[in-house]
Image (tube, grey):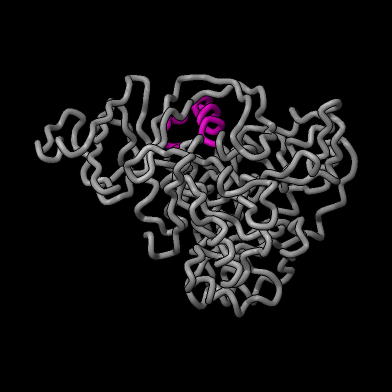
């Protein structure tokens, strides 16, 4: 049982008790509610400090774990989501070998993850040219949806769908979800060199906007449910709002780095900041925040995509020597997503319950995980103890390759404890379960 002066329940913060039995929340009474003596004797009581808030464990539906095949980039044992208050992650189908584009590969991924996970883990499938016949089987095998690229993914074994229509029609036929990296490769140039401005110019907002417009047309034609991953161009917000008003089944995510970082602060050669699509200008960042507050953007997930230092072209002797054309594009932030977003949300006058909705409730809803992302009777007792006013400076991280553009940044909000199904997370004794679509709803 938990008792706290501050608990995020039903989208608001209030004093409450949270009663837990067999890993599930059974009731959320008043903070000082009396409980049955039998029940009180059987379960320990955890009382939060006055500066702590009890929040639901976050759900991050966009994580690249990379195991098997590229475990030196990241692995299930080192994707330390619990350190950031995350209790459920969904792993992307690419960067691991083999990519998760058929049921056999899904089983390889599950076997690699088994026994290693400190938090609960589910898996997306992948859509690549010619595997339309595998998509229904992936759905039936428990993949939460399928992800595709509309341009080069960066790894040769996961080629793009230059014509996503056939895959979208197939996904629509069984009521699945299509997640899309939406950039038009015809509008993306070849970046080279140290200048960050050249890299941003090579992947203009128009490349995202045009790809999203085409995706929305196909969604109207096919009836497919689509999800736009890592939106960075605020110019697309009007298109997305109009499509949703017309009844198109589209959801949208953005990431901490697009809500916090700006192109103006990126030093030439500092490839820690490289991601695709790129971190854009401050006015674009501000417009993304407005889209999030207005509900056009549904959620915030990390797109945790780490790699080894050599792939970032980092040299300890010269940290600003990187080539933005050659460096791997990805930002590792699984451990930092909550404090990064909360620091900026607080600065903009947004309450913590907004952040919880964006980073826990709505990602869980996207994946159909009805027992995750909320503090409510019947939900899994996945919880985080969060001190929202405590500050810290980003130093060493627990990820396998702790490369981050947030290094040295002062953030507000510390995760003091993370609980999975009513037990405190212990990375040395992993208890995470492998989730399948529908089974763990």
The relative height of residue 110 versus residue 220 in the rendered view (above or below) is above
**Is residue 203 among the parts visible in the rendering?**
yes
At a point 57% along the width and 66% down the height, the residue shown is 106
Q: Main secondary structure of the magenta part?
A: helix
Locate residue 245, reporting x and y percent.
49, 58
Locate residue 5, reporting x and y percent.
28, 25
Q: In the drawing, does residue 33 fall left or right of residue 98?
A: left
Residue 39, picture quadrant = top left
Residue 370 located within the stretch drawn in magenta: no
The C terminus sits in image quarter: bottom left
The relative height of residue 190 versus residue 258 in the rendered view (above or below) is below
At a point 53% along the width and 44% down the height, the residue shown is 300
The span picked out in magenta is 337-355
The relative height of residue 282 versus residue 392 in the rendered view (above or below) is below
Q: In the drawing, does residue 75 fall left or right of residue 200?
A: left
Residue 339 located within the stretch drawn in magenta: yes
Frontmost residue, 214 versus 329: 329
The relative height of residue 331 versus residue 395 in the rendered view (above or below) is below
**Is residue 221 among the parts visible in the rendering?**
no
At a point 82% along the width and 42% down the height, the residue shown is 199
The N terminus sits in image quarter: top left
């Amino acid at each position: 049982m938990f008792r706290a002066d501050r608990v995020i329940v039903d989208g608001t913060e209030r004093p409450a008790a949270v009663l837990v039995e067999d890993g599930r929340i059974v009731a959320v009474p008043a903070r000082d509610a009396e409980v049955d003596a039998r029940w009180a004797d059987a379960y320990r009581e955890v009382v939060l400090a006055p500066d702590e808030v009890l929040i639901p464990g976050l759900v991050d539906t966009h994580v690249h774990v990379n195991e098997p095949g590229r475990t030196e980039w990241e692995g299930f044992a080192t994707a330390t989501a619990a350190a950031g208050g995350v209790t459920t992650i969904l792993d992307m189908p690419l960067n691991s070998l083999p990519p998760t584009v058929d049921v056999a590969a899904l089983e390889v991924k599950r076997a690699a993850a088994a026994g290693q996970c400190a938090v609960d883990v589910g898996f997306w499938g992948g859509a690549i040219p010619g595997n339309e016949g595998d998509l229904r089987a992936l759905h039936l095998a428990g993949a939460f949806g399928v992800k595709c690229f509309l341009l080069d993914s960066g790894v040769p074994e996961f080629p793009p769908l230059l014509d996503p229509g056939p895959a979208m029609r197939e996904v629509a036929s069984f009521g699945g979800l299509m997640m899309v990296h939406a950039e038009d490769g015809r509008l993306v140039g070849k970046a080279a060199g140290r200048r960050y401005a050249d890299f941003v110019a090579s992947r203009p907002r128009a490349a995202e906007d045009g790809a999203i417009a085409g995706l929305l047309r196909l969604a109207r034609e096919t009836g497919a449910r689509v999800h736009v991953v890592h939106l960075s161009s605020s110019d697309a917000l009007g298109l997305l709002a109009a499509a949703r008003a017309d009844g198109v089944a589209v959801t949208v995510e953005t990431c901490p780095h697009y809500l916090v970082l700006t192109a103006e602060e990126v030093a030439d050669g500092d490839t820690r900041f490289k991601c695709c699509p790129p971190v854009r200008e401050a006015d674009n960042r501000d417009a993304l925040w407005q889209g999030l507050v207005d509900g056009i953007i549904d959620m915030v997930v990390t797109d945790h995509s780490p790699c080894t230092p050599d792939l970032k072209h980092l040299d300890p002797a010269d940290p600003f020597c990187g080539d933005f054309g050659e460096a791997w594009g990805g930002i590792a932030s699984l451990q930092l997503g909550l404090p990064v977003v909360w620091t900026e949300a607080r600065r903009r006058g947004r309450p913590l319950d907004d952040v919880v909705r964006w980073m826990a409730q709505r990602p869980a809803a996207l994946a159909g995980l009805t027992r995750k992302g909320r503090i409510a009777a019947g939900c899994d007792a996945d919880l985080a103890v969060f001190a929202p006013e405590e500050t810290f400076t980003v130093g060493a991280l627990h990820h396998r390759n702790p490369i981050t553009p947030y290094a040295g940044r002062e953030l507000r909000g510390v995760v003091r404890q993370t609980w999975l199904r009513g037990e405190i997370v212990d990375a040395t004794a992993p208890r995470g379960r492998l989730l399948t679509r529908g089974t763990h709803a």
